[in-house]
Amino acid sequence: MIEEYVEHKNIVSKKIKKRLYQELLTAKALETNSLVVAPTGLGKTIVAVLLIAYKFDIKKNILFLAPTKPLVTQHKKSLDSLLTISEDDILLLTGQTKPEDRKKIYSQKGKVICATPQTINNDLKKGLIDINSFNIIIYDEAHRAVGDYAYVLIAKVFEENSNLKKLALTASPGSNRDKISEIKDNLFLNHIEIRTDSDLDVIDYIKDVEIEVIFCDLDKVSLEISNIIDSYIDSKINLLRKFGVIIPNNYSKKQLLIFQAKIFEKLKSSNNSLHFLSLSAISSVLKFYHAKELVQTQGVVALRNYLDKIFLESKDQKSSKATKGIVNSEEYKKIRLILLKLDFSKPLYSKEIKLIEIVSSFIKENKNSKVLIFNNYRDNASHLSNVLNTNKLIKATRFVGQANKGLSDKGLSQKEQIQIIKDFRDNKFNTLVCTSVGEEGLDIPSVDLVIFYDAVASEIRSIQRRGRTGRFNTGKVYILLNKDTIDQHYYYVSINKEKSMKKTLKNFYDYKPRLKKVLKKQKTIRDY
């Protein structure tokens, strides 16, 4: 089969292969301000590249926004390699760029500016940017455009530019109609383009991803600790009920947070000692609920680290009554005694043992393969890397964000992140243990195996995690769940939210599958 390529004066010859769905999406983006929702791995960035190529004007500027510095850097590299526009006219702009240099960049014309939204938002506040000098704004990972996130604030200012073309990209806008509408409205978009893996123009480019859920039994130590935590929580819940707080038997963490907020409001309006006692009780419940979540989804090392933090907090004169109460409780002391008897230098947790078994077996059968492990809590990422490296076949390292989390948990600088990804690509490592920083957009090489070490209740994060495999070949995803725990609950929550998202997108936006007769009638970029 002869490969066909998109030909345009602003696109490097034989660089972008023709894909009908990308041409259709770009044509729509040229026509109207659009939110593009399409599965991960389908090359939504190419739609942005094509839009830039077709709308580039030496008298105007283009703004390409992405949530993180590494992702912005990645987009700059993509544009450099795909567009004939001079690299000097494709600029990387972050908070590290000096304000005087940023001001100079904004005053020029015919530039494509790749930037973080936080930087642009700050410069808009300082009056450094002439919004009318731009003719395109692109929002990558558009599902972030909610609340007071910088995308929302930028969109409000740029809406005054009536000639601006707007494009937003996401694989996962959210599970309900209100969330999707909020994104669309916040970015002042008037159209949504949806692609699913069953669309005729997409189906040939979707690679199969095999998903296998593995249920583990909570080990005896973790089960014992979990039961002790339940005992503490139950006693506090009963106390709250005596104080008049109506808490149902099947309460969730979300409900507890709502109860906490309501009690806090009551305390502000009335300095009632009962409200104070209720607030302290529910705060201690939430702290121990988090401890239960850690032992049921992460393991005893993450739990130990968390209990250490609570102990240190309790020694601070400003620490809360809830924190001091936990440290002085019999349940806390029992758990600490159990943890003191454990040898943390070897795998202890049922999931850890299963994880080593899966990764080592996969690498043994698939030489030079790459594995990505997602772990919800940064506390546990270093530990898992160390545990995995006890096996000779596995060369693992952690991949986390830039922020420092205390003295013992240093973040990775952008330079360090880029080097780790390079080492991963060059097979110096075959396994990355990632937190959420690995979920969204980063140029991590396509991997052969993705493992969820824990479940996430967010359908957005679940979709992004899975999207790291199956980009070029059939991918494999393992989801490790502790049976009959919070872990399992979060998994089913994300599954239901994802189903709801797909249903909402199809029903609310009058989605119709793209059949041949429909495709023939639609405009592509060749019509522009």
Image (cartoon, helix red, strand yellow):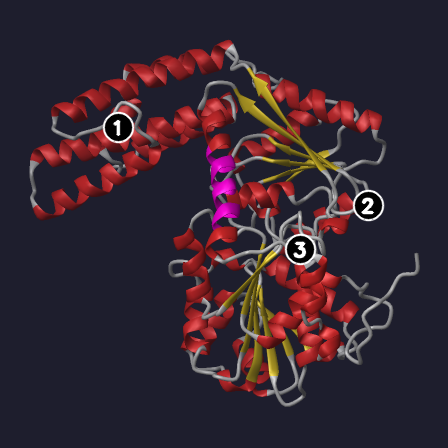
| Extreme-front residue of the structure | 517
Give the overall secondary structure of the magenta segment.
helix
Query: Who comes first in sequence, dot 1 or dot 3?
Result: 1
Q: Amino acid at mark 1?
A: Lys
Find disc 2 in the rendering and name its residue: 426
Q: Position of residue 444 (x, y in %)?
A: 70, 49
Q: Earlier in the sequence, mark 2 or mark 3?
A: 3
Q: Is residue 281 left or right of residue 382?
A: left
* Residue 501 part of the magenta-drawn span: yes
Image coords of residue 345 (percent x, y): 61, 19
Label 1 Cα neighbours within 10 Å, binned few <14 / some 14-19 / many ≥20: some
Which quadrant is the C terminus positioned in?
A: bottom right
Q: Is residue 487 above or below residue 178?
A: above
Q: Which residue is mark 1?
A: 324
Horizontal relation, residue 283 to residue 493: left or right: left
Question: Label 1's element?
Answer: helix
Going by the numbered disc 3, the residue's amino acid type is Lys
Image coords of residue 516 (percent x, y): 72, 59
Magenta residues span: 493-504
